[in-house]
Image: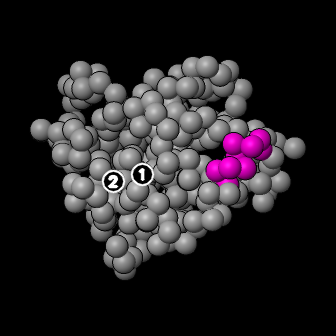
Amino acid sequence: MPEISIILSLEEMSRYNLRQKNILIIDTLTAGTTIAAALANGIEFIYPFSELSSLYRFYKGKRNKSSYILIGENGTEKLAGFDYGNSPLQFLNKRFRKKSILLMTDNCLAESVKLCRPGRVYIGSLVNSSRVVEEISAGGEDICLVCAGNQGAFSLEDFFTAGRYSYLLKKAGWKGDDLCTAAGRIYECNSAYEEIVNLFCHSWKGSNLCRLGHERDIQFSSRIDILDIVPVFDGEKIREKRFTARWWQEYIYLSSSIDI
């Protein structure tokens, strides 16, 4: 019987041997949700960076710079010279063709994945949870749910989302330890949309987003299963597992009607 495990922050990954495990990295507010939204609307590849110097060096070496969109923020403010901040709402009702993203993150996502097996790392959030679980279930192997966390600290919203994944995987036959049970119970007891929004707004990161007027990011990120997207990370870039056009077409219709 395959097993679920949970790691509470990206910084903790170095303590474990993850080379033979499938990994699901959860970053609910808001990078994981932004990644899913961008891929759903046609973005081909997303290259994550944790240092501006590395991002600019990569960008400088590209001939067709118009093919790249720069995303990053300082706090919640868009970085100077970048196209977008780190908000999934910026991708609603937009269609992208032959575009890739250079994503500046404030966590060690790019470095952490070097500890894992290339090509077996998924990116998850609430908005695409059932589709990602379907993909994991098809493989039938152990999975480690890694919460991105907040600068190395525990993140309530990521732990809650790990609970959603743990709950679904246990229903599919996976087994997990007490940490998985605790996360699953928090999800089960707060699974209504209004409860999720309330929980996220009271988290450390969520309360900061609310204070700065970004409640709509929380409201969108609290939606369950509105995207049929499986982001996979090969250690260099993130892409959608299936390159089919109908997913972004469905998402554009959905994003026009969703109440946020």
Question: Residue 251: x and y, percent?
Answer: 42, 68
**Amino acid, disc 1:** Ser
Answer yes or no: do the residues labelled 1 and 2 have beta carbons within 8 Å? yes
Q: Is residue 55 visible?
A: yes
Q: Residue at x 39, y 32 (%)?
A: 151
Quarter residue 45 falls in: top left
The residue indicated by pointer 2 is 207
Q: In the picture, residue 250 is in which quadrant?
A: bottom left
Residue at the image point whose x is 78% and y is 60% from the top: 171
Instruction: Give neighbour class at mark 2: few <14, some 14-19, many 20+ (Cα, 10 Å).
Output: some
Residue most extreme to the right: 1
- Position of residue 227 relative to residue 148, above or below, is below
- Answer whether residue 179 is magenta in the image: yes
Residue 228 placement (x, y as % from top left):
54, 62
Please give the residue where the numbered disc 1 appears in the rendered image: 203
Amino acid under disc 2: Ser
Q: Residues within 10 Å of mark 1 (few under 14, many from 20)?
A: some
Which type of secondary structure does the marked residue at label 1 adopt?
Answer: loop
Q: How many marks?
A: 2
Q: Quadrant of the N terminus?
A: top right
Residue 91 image label: none
| Relative to 251, residue 239 above or below | above
Tell me the quadrant of the picture where the C terminus can be found.
Answer: bottom left
Q: Is residue 202 left or right of residue 51?
A: right
Determine if residue 249 is in view.
Answer: no
Q: Quadrant of residue 92?
A: bottom left
Q: Residue at x 56, y 53 (%)?
A: 160
What range of the chain is rendered magenta? 176-184
Question: Horizontal and vertical percent for residue 132?
Answer: 61, 53
The x, y position of residue 193, in whole percent, is 50, 71
